[in-house]
């Protein structure tokens, strides 16, 4: 919530308001839709939801209120207007009130009302909101059940719930309570409701108004922040914009500032947050707690107040309507809204509503119409619930919740005190109810429901998992139902915030400084620590002791990408030559010379930073020290001043004490029937003719020294003699596959330039020779053996490119049988499917590693090929697996060729050994990636290319000191593609802390997720996937619970409080849990799962991030030079009238809404008709208009960023292929039963609460 | 009746048979006392240009255990159209086609002059000849080049329909697919792993019936060739190019090592390839090796140069660790090949040994050639190889394939065994003696490769009991039935029926003694001795021989390389014995007792004693040992030659003198197979040792002064001279009565 809000806040004051105005969404949608959609969407959504209602009434407010509801509201408002009218009016009001009350309560509870407020209004708020949400969720479940039953009330509840989630519980009870609370707080509430909203909306504009509201806002605002995202982000964003003051307030303590806060809440928060955090570490801590508070505070700012006010009044109607149609509508509205302008001016929003109304009038109907596909389900579900109320209600309820949440936040302040108690109580109750109700809702309510319960039900077989006590499915729960998706931390918001603050180059000189996110473009200046492009850590402030580490459960890990490609404006690591004696190293731990070595005794000795051992400086390396104790030549020597550099290795570092030979590339091509028929053989041979000129080289002016060899095979192997002196190549058939050997030496591995004619002749003839083949059986083990033997014979390292099509069933070592058995999925034996079928390949992999033989596997399967087994060698040798299922020359050629080109050309090191040394106190204990380990410390990589990352986990074996921090040095010994033996050294120092809060302030969620995913994906080899999922959830719950317990200020258990750095942990974690590996859909093949599993294991943070949380860009408007702001991965964010680009790092989708404007179609496809779009196209037509050009530019740039070429898939709304596309809308409930974000968050909250209790 | 020598010559001329005794003692007891058994040297395909091929099939005795062929010795009842088998006395009806038979209208097989007759079998398909080259690539470029040229040349000598195949080997073994366009294709096998025929068939993809043919009709049944064995006319160019592109084995050979040569596997693959594609069809595997097998099954020496290949010394001390295993490997190959009627030739050209000792059975069992030379780049090899493809008048090769020899005997005599390039077919029958000599226990042998000079020694046993005398004038008959594949692809059957008189040794000892053929007996005994030397161990053979017979040539036999291993490597011994066991009588005699001619101004060339006393300064000597043709210039002649007198017109006679032996030598060289080593040396020349080692050392450094200086040259040896030998024998003969 906060996050969302923050951003909005931060960016544009007005926007925030708009956002707040979410209510305005409805309207806004109309106006803002597209532009805001992303940002505002979320932010606004939060409170907006509420606003909408308010909106209608108060245009200005609406915006805010809307914002909260917005998501749903969008439509809802409108809907509400008309459809809801009746029902809404009836129910809504009630619900609304309740929600409010509840909210207030909940928040109050959460935050403990006042206190929280005072303490850390800002953050608390957020957390609170979460908590509430969670609470609600918990309640939600029950509520769901109830929901169904008592839709009307439910809705209200849900609304409240959602809004609050937090509010959740409270709703029902709240309802009643609320009323009182409100009444009690009336002022506040009123203020809120009335004032706040206004303040919000107005806030920006009318400072004065804000002031008035301030007080309440502060509270709420804080809460909101929490919601949004842990305050920090939100705050930061805010800070930037206005908030400073408010933030400060927050940080310091929300209370005082309140007034001011209120005024500035939004802005202030944003602005300040960062400041506060940075400025006052403690503050930050405080902030955190405060955050919760702040949260509250923000809430007010956000719209809590507004929402409240609005909500209350408008709510009833608004929400219900919203819920029903709103979500979809709202979004569409947004999108369509191109609202950008809207943002600028609130007014628009107001108008929008009206306009929207017109368009959406019949919320339900509209919604359905618009999102026929998606909506229906929602609607339907809602229907069930809504029925009572209205069809709309439920949804609205859901959406409402957010708003309500926001509001609640706001309210809380006031009501908190009183409501608080009830809140908790209520919450529980509500939760039970929720659970009960959930299941149904899940199905039913998309937007609303989906979040919390639906997802849960699905993913977590049972609410049981949730353990949601929920037994009491009391009516209360119903109310709680859902969280407003906009009210929960938005990845987009966080990403954008980070982008916004990273303008300066990132300098690595400061120890323990977390780098910008992987989604941010930034420049790095190496000042003594390795660039984040080489090393990213989960925590830049490691706990000093093992106890702390254990308590927090935060994984201590680093993702190392030793040969990462640097952007052109950053210089690659310098090459250092220490002469014949080799690199200078510590005598004891053998660490390489680095900036952490302390020179003493006038420079005659140095003390190792890792083990403290003192070593003599060799005479040739001696240098005097200056007055500061630094060597005079410190800045002349990369190894003394930089974080990353390379040493020239001496013969001592070479295998057999012999300088290495230049490496070789061997191409092994399957020429069985399938391979020939699919066109693969032809394509490969054609491509190789040109590709061979691009073999990797270090000096672009020189020819590559890499030699090449060719083998084709089916049941037998064909080697080729392509010696330059031959007129024609010679084929040597080895049919003795049981005992592989290399039939020739001279003439097999050749220099491309010398043998060019013969090679070309060969490549021309291969497709012809096998054109009529009828051989369908293939071998695989012997193929790798052949390459390995060839390298052995040539006494060099190298890489095998294997192009393979089918399960190797021919009689030979490594023969496999088809063991695809889907019945095993979900059983304890499922893990066996990920394990290799035979031990042969493990042994083979070991031999390959010993020789420095890296294997890249290109698969073109038409059926099961057992990737789990075939991939063993590539994975163990640092190679890659590429898979082109049902390969068709026409459709997949481009992807394959681009992958192949990149794979052949990319820089790669061979025969590598990586070792991570650490300072005393921690130790690298576990490694994840594509490599082989024969002992516990050395990571052996037959090949290491620029795309491979290795995740290293650290454990304490002693205490660390805060003074010295924790050092790590990753040294990779490898043979470069020119045959030079080198050592690449990356150094990294992080801080150490004795306070948990410090740890939580300096984490990187993306890296944590990278670690978790690898950990889990390896876990499935030995554990049932369900157990793996549970473990993940548990650990995350523990991390968050620990934070809540130790770092967040005391607050109601019902509050979900997330650390700022980890506020996205739940959503990302949910993505991991829903991945095909851990939770496969019915149509996901075993091969795909094994493939993904292996793929993830060597991904770096940036790839894993986009893999788990795809990038979704609205394309309605494109500007050169910048990308449109991404939107969240949820169907709700898609507008029927829009076109979206979704990128996962592996796939690229262009989603085209059914109602997209002709002009857009013409621009993109050159056709005016939706129905004429050819869904099978893999590239956009080249059209001469700026839009098309820019779009293709964007697509090209995306492709260039990723290590694998992404085939473009055009998905038309409502087309069959949309199912595939929807799979990547990771915030939604997935077809395979994965929870929606909202649901999962609720679940998470429940887990945390259980841990805390 | 002509004299026995004439009779013998006539028989040899007509039937290719020479018996040790031409009148046979009539009882077992007497025969045993004769010491030299009744035995025969039989040359199955002795050239008979005058023999018309009979275009029908032979008439066989109807008795199942007999199946003798109708022959001139049979009694025929022309009226009843019956004939009586002269072996089993079964009366047989003539087949309907003989209906017109009468005293004046006899079929050829009944005419006495056709005691040897050849039938051409009309049934069955004509099989192509198959030539499979197995080529070593581990050799110097020069050698390889010479070999490649020889091989390319040989292609032009093959009949267009002959199938050829190519296997090359070094560290790996490559089976070349022929006739592919563009990329040349070969199947590669590692040289350390033996494969059986079935594995090979799978690996070469030769499982046609099930795999390829089932798939489509386009692979018309073409059983007569496959990818590896194709008609010369079709792949002539292709194969020529392929041979031209042959490279020396590219695997690096480190210093102090021998190249890795996978001969054992290469031969195994060759045998396997033919086994699964052309069983029971005539085929030649021609193996060209430039050194010993150094890896895999069949290796005879390791690749460490510092460990030399085994010598007789090692063999005696049982110190040759690879020999037994290798021998076993090659023996099994030889057996497989012979079972399928395939010939294995070995052309070994290297300065050192190549393992002929271990591989000898390949040639010996299959009737293949074994040729030993120093290099492929010598005329010895080139011409020998060329001579393999010699053609007869009709234009077919003088070689025959996949033959079986069956021997049928009268009741009084049985066959004990055979010695020669054959293997037993283990055919038991009434005429098989229990007493085995050589390859016995059978009345049928397989001779995969035959040429017109291939001669077998067959040993018989008289089984008639002393108390069952044979009626006066009775004759014992022996029929040799040789079925073979003619090089034209026809199956032919040659039948030789011969008979000898029985005589009571007590009453007719004179006639028996007169019928003794000492040359034949000598060779027969020598073969027996060599056989025993091969199969038994130790010097006992010499002692046995001494006990058996004492004749002049036995002195030389004792000194010959067939029995004497001193100064010979195991390979050489194997080579010599191989040749000895297959050559005909004349050649064999030369081998044992070389021929020495002297050329001088004193008169026309004359044969002289193989004695050191024959070595005189003013003579030119021409020695023919079968394996070597040596021209030796006496001391004075050598000096004249060095002074260049032959260049001067006034000494033209000297030039003629010098030229005469050379011309004679050329003549010998041209007719002989394998090509002998031609040596031109002079007094004091290092090569003169070949002469000195052969002559009877009547003068040695011990007694040279006793004989006077002007006669002959002293031989520096401790060997006994014939004089001493004879003295010793006389002593023994007198005293050994006891």
Image (cartoon, coloured by chain):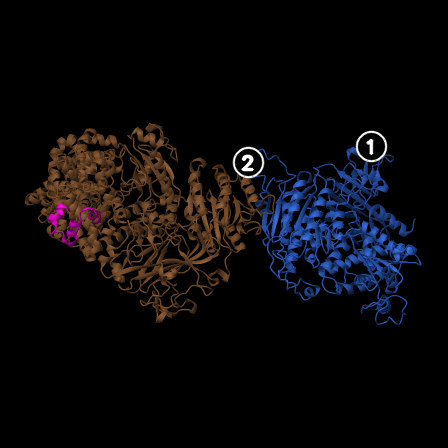
Chain colours: A brown, B blue
Mark 2, other Cα within 10 Å: few <14 / some 14–19 / many ≥20: few
Mark 1 — residue? B100
Which chain does tag 2 point to? B
Is residue A253 rendered magenta in the image?
yes
Quadrant of the image for the N terminus of chain A? top left
| Viewer-proximal residue among A1164 and A362 | A1164
Callout 1 environment at 10 Å: few (<14), some (14 to 19), or many (20+)? few
Estimate the x, y position of residue B374 in percent, counting from the top left.
72, 56
Residue B366: where, in percent of width, then height?
71, 50
The residue segment tinted magenta is A236-264
Q: Position of residue A190 (x, y in %)?
A: 8, 42
Q: CA distance from mark 1 to mark 2?
A: 55 Å
On the image, the x and y values in percent for residue B531 come to 75, 58
Left or right of A980 in this view: A428: left
Q: Earlier in the sequence, mark 1 or mark 2?
A: 1
Magenta residues: mostly which secondary structure?
helix
Closest to the camera, between mark 1 and mark 2, is 2
Q: Is residue A585 shown above or below A1144?
A: below
- Chain letter of the residue carrying label 1: B
Q: Secondary structure at mark 1?
A: loop
- Side of B467 relative to A876 (left or right): right
Asked whether A619 falls inside the magenta stretch, the response is: no
Q: Which residue is mark 2?
A: B215
Q: Is residue B684 depicted above or below A373 in this figure?
A: below
Q: Are marks 1 and 2 in contact (CB under 8 Å)?
A: no
Q: Is residue A1159 visible?
A: yes
Q: Is residue A244 above or below residue A442?
A: below
Residue A617, quarter of picture: bottom left
Tag 1 and tag 2 share a subunit: yes
Towards the viewer: B27 or A1012? A1012
Q: Nearer the viewer, residue B715 or B559?
A: B715
Q: Dot 2: what SS?
A: helix
């Amino acid at each position: 919530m906060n996050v969302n809000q923050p951003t909005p806040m931060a960016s544009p004051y007005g926007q925030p308001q708009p956002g707040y105005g979410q209510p305005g969404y409805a309207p806004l949608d109309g106006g803002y839709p597209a532009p805001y959609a992303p940002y505002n969407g979320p932010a606004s959504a939060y409170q907006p939801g509420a606003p909408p209602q308010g909106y209608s009434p108060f245009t200005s407010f609406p915006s805010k209120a809307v914002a909260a509801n917005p998501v749903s509201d969008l439509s809802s408002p409108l809907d509400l207007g008309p459809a809801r009218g009746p029902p809404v009016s009836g129910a809504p009001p009630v619900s609304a009130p309740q929600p409010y009350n509840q909210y207030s309560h909940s928040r109050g509870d959460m935050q403990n009302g006042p206190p929280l407020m005072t303490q850390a209004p800002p953050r608390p708020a957020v957390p609170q909101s979460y908590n509430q949400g969670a609470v609600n969720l918990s309640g939600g479940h029950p509520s769901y059940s109830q929901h169904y039953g008592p839709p009307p009330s439910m809705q209200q509840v849900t609304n409240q719930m959602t809004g609050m989630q937090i509010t959740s519980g409270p709703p029902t009870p709240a309802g009643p309570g609320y009323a009182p609370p409100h009444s009690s707080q009336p002022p506040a509430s009123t203020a809120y409701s009335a004032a706040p909203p206004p303040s919000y909306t107005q806030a920006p504009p009318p400072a004065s108004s804000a002031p008035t509201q301030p007080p309440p806002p502060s509270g709420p605002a804080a809460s909101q922040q929490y919601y949004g995202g842990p305050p920090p982000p939100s705050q930061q964003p805010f800070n930037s914009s206005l908030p400073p003051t408010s933030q400060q307030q927050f940080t310091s303590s929300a209370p005082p500032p309140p007034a001011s806060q209120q005024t500035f809440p939004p802005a202030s928060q944003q602005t300040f947050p960062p400041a506060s955090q940075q400025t006052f570490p403690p503050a930050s801590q405080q902030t955190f707690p405060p955050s919760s508070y702040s949260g509250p505070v923000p809430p007010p700012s956000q719209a809590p107040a507004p929402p409240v006010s609005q909500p209350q009044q408008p709510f009833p109607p608004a929400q219900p309507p919203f819920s029903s149609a709103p979500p979809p509508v709202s979004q569409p509205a947004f999108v369509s809204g191109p609202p950008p302008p809207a943002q600028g001016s609130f007014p628009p929003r107001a108008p929008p509503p009206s306009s929207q109304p017109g368009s959406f009038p019949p919320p339900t109907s509209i919604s359905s119409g618009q999102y026929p596909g998606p909506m229906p389900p929602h609607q339907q579900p809602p229907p069930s619930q809504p029925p009572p109320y209205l069809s709309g209600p439920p949804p609205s309820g859901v959406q409402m919740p957010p708003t309500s949440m926001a509001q609640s936040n706001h309210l809380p302040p006031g009501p908190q005190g009183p409501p608080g108690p009830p809140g908790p109580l209520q919450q529980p109750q509500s939760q039970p109810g929720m659970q009960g109700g959930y299941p149904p809702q899940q199905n039913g309510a998309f937007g609303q429901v989906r979040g919390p319960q639906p997802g849960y039900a699905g993913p977590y077989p049972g609410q049981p998992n949730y353990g949601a006590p929920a037994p009491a499915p009391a009516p209360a729960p119903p109310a709680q139902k859902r969280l407003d998706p906009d009210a929960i931390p938005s990845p987009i918001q966080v990403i954008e915030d980070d982008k916004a603050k990273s303008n300066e180059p990132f300098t690595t000189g400061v120890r323990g400084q977390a780098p910008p996110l992987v989604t941010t473009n930034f420049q790095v200046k190496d000042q003594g620590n390795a660039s984040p492009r080489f090393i990213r850590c989960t925590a830049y402030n490691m706990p000093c002791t093992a106890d702390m580490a254990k308590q927090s459960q935060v994984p201590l890990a680093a993702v190392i990408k030793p040969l990462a490609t640097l952007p052109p404006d950053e210089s690659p690591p310098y090459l250092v030559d220490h002469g014949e004696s080799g690199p200078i190293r510590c005598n004891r731990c053998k660490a390489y010379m680095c900036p952490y070595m302390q020179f003493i005794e006038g420079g005659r000795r140095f003390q190792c930073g890792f083990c403290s051992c003192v070593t003599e400086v060799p005479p040739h390396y001696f240098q005097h020290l200056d007055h500061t104790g630094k060597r005079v030549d410190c800045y002349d020597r990369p190894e003394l001043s930089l974080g990353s550099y390379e040493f020239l290795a001496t013969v001592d570092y070479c295998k057999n004490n012999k300088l290495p030979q230049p490496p070789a590339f061997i191409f092994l091509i399957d020429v069985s029937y399938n391979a020939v028929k699919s066109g693969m053989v032809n394509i490969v041979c054609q491509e190789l003719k040109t590709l061979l000129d691009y073999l990797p080289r270090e000096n672009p002016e020189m020819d590559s020294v890499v030699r090449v060899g060719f083998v084709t095979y089916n049941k037998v192997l064909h080697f080729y003699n392509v010696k330059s002196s031959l007129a024609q190549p010679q084929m040597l058939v080895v049919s003795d596959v049981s005992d592989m050997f290399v039939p020739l030496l001279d003439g097999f591995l050749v220099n491309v330039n010398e043998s060019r004619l013969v090679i070309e002749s060969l490549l021309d003839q291969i497709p012809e020779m096998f054109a009529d083949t009828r051989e369908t059986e293939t071998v695989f083990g012997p193929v790798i053996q052949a390459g390995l033997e060839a390298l052995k014979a040539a006494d060099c390292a190298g890489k095998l490119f294997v192009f393979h099509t089918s399960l190797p069933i021919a009689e030979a070592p490594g023969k496999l049988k088809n063991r695809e058995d889907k019945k095993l999925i979900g059983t304890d034996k499922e893990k066996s499917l990920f394990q290799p079928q035979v031990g042969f390949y493990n042994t083979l992999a070991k031999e390959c590693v010993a020789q420095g033989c890296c294997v890249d596997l290109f698969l073109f399967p038409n059926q099961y090929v057992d990737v789990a087994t075939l991939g063993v060698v590539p994975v163990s040798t640092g190679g890659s697996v590429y898979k082109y299922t049902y390969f068709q020359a026409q459709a997949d050629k481009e992807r394959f060729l681009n992958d192949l080109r990149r794979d052949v050309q990319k820089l790669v090191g061979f025969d590598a050994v990586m070792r991570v040394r650490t300072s005393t106190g921690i130790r690298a204990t576990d490694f994840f990636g594509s490599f082989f380990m024969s002992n516990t410390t050395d990571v052996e990589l037959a090949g290491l290319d620029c795309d491979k990352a290795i995740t290293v986990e650290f454990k304490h074996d002693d205490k660390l000191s805060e003074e010295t921090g924790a050092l790590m040095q990753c040294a990779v010994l490898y043979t470069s593609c020119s045959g030079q033996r080198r050592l690449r050294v990356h150094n990294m120092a992080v801080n150490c802390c004795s306070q948990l809060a410090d740890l939580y302030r300096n984490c990187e969620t993306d890296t944590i997720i990278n670690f978790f995913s690898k950990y889990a994906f390896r876990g499935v080899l030995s554990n049932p996937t369900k157990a793996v999922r549970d473990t993940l959830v548990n650990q995350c719950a523990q991390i968050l619970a620990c934070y809540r317990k130790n770092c967040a200020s005391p607050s109601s258990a019902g509050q979900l409080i997330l650390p700022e750095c980890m506020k996205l942990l739940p959503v990302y974690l949910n993505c991991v849990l829903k991945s095909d590996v851990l939770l496969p859909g019915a149509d996901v093949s075993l091969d795909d799962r094994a493939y993904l599993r292996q793929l993830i294991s060597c991904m770096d943070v940036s790839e894993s991030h986009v893999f788990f949380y795809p990038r979704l860009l609205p394309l309605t408007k494109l500007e050169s030079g910048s990308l449109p702001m991404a939107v969240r991965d949820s169907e709700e964010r898609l507008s029927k009238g829009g076109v979206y680009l979704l990128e996962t790092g592996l796939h690229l989708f262009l989603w085209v809404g059914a109602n997209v404007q002709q002009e857009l179609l013409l621009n993109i496809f050159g056709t005016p008709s939706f129905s004429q779009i050819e869904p099978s196209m893999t590239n956009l037509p080249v059209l001469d208009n700026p839009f098309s050009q820019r779009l293709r530019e964007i697509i090209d740039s995306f492709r260039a960023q990723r290590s694998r070429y992404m085939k473009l898939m055009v998905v038309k709304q409502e087309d069959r292929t949309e199912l595939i596309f929807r799979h990547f809308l990771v915030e939604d409930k997935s077809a395979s039963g994965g929870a929606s974000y909202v649901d999962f968050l609720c679940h998470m909250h429940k887990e945390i609460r259980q841990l805390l209790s | 009746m002509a004299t026995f020598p004439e009779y013998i010559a006539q028989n040899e001329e007509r039937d290719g048979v020479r018996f040790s005794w031409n009148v046979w003692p009539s009882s077992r007891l007497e025969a045993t006392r004769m010491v030299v058994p009744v035995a025969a040297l039989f040359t199955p395909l002795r050239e008979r240009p005058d023999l018309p091929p009979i275009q029908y099939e032979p008439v066989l005795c109807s008795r199942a255990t007999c199946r003798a062929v109708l022959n001139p010795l049979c009694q025929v009842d022309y009226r009843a159209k019956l004939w009586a088998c002269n072996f089993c006395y079964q009366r047989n009806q003539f087949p309907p086609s003989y209906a017109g038979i009468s005293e004046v209208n006899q079929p050829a097989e009944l005419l006495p002059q056709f005691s040897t007759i050849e039938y051409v079998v009309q049934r069955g398909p004509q099989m192509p000849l198959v030539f499979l080259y197995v080529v070593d690539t581990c050799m110097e470029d020069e050698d390889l080049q010479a070999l490649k040229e020889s091989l390319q040349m040989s292609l032009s000598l093959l009949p267009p329909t002959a199938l050829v195949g190519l296997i090359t080997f070094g560290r790996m073994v490559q089976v070349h697919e022929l006739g592919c366009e563009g990329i040349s294709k070969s199947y590669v096998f590692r040289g350390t792993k033996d494969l059986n025929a079935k594995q090979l068939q799978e690996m070469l993809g030769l499982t046609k019936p099930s795999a390829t043919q089932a798939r489509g009709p386009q692979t018309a049944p073409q059983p007569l060739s496959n990818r590896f064995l194709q008609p010369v006319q079709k792949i002539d160019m292709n194969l020529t190019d392929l041979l031209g592109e042959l490279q020396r084995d590219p695997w690096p050979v480190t210093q102090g090592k021998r190249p890795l040569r996978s001969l054992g596997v290469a031969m195994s693959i060759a045998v396997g390839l033919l086994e699964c594609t052309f069983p029971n069809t005539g085929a030649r595997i021609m193996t060209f090796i430039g050194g010993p097998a150094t890896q895999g099954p069949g290796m005879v020496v390791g690749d460490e140069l510092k460990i030399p290949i085994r010598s007789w010394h090692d063999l005696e001390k049982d110190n040759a660790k690879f020999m037994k295993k290798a021998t076993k490997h090659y023996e099994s190959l030889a057996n497989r090949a012979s079972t399928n009627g395939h010939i294995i030739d070995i052309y070994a050209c290297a300065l050192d040994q190549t393992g002929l000792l271990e591989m000898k059975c390949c040639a010996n069992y299959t009737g293949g050639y074994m040729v030993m030379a120093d290099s492929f780049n010598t005329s010895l090899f080139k011409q020998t190889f060329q001579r393999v493809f010699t053609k007869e008048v009709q234009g077919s090769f003088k070689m025959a394939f996949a033959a079986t020899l069956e021997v049928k005997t009268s009741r009084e005599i049985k066959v004990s065994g055979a010695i020669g390039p054959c293997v037993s077919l283990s055919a038991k029958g009434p005429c098989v003696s229990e007493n085995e000599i050589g390859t016995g226990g059978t009345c049928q042998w397989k001779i995969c490769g035959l040429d017109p000079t291939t001669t077998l020694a067959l040993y018989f046993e008289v089984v008639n009991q002393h108390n069952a005398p044979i009626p006066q004038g009775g004759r014992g008959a022996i029929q040799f039935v040789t079925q073979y594949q003619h090089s034209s692809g026809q199956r032919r059957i040659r039948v030789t029926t011969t008979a000898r008189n029985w005589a009571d040794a007590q009453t007719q000892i004179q006639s028996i003694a007169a019928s003794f053929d000492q040359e034949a007996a000598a060779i027969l005994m020598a073969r027996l001795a060599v056989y025993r030397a091969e199969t038994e161990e130790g010097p006992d053979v010499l002692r046995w021989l001494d006990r058996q017979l004492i004749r002049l040539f036995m002195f030389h036999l004792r000194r010959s390389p067939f029995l004497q291993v001193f100064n010979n490597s195991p390979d050489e011994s194997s080579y010599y014995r191989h040749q000895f066991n297959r050559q005909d009588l004349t050649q064999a005699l030369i081998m044992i007792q070389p021929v020495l001619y002297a050329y001088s101004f004193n008169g026309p060339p004359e044969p002289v004693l193989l004695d050191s006393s024959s070595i005189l300064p003013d003579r030119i000597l021409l020695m023919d040992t079968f394996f070597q043709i040596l021209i030796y210039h006496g001391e004075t002649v050598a000096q004249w030659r060095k002074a260049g007198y032959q260049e001067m017109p006034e000494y033209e006679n000297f030039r003629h003198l010098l030229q005469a032996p050379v011309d004679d030598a050329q003549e010998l060289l041209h007719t002989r197979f394998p090509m002998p080593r031609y040596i031109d040396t002079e007094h004091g020349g290092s090569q003169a040792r070949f002469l000195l080692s052969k002559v009877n050392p009547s003068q040695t450094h011990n007694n040279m002064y006793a004989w006077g200086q002007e006669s002959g040259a002293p031989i520096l040896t401790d060997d006994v001279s014939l004089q001493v030998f004879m003295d010793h024998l006389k002593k023994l003969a007198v005293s050994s009565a006891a």
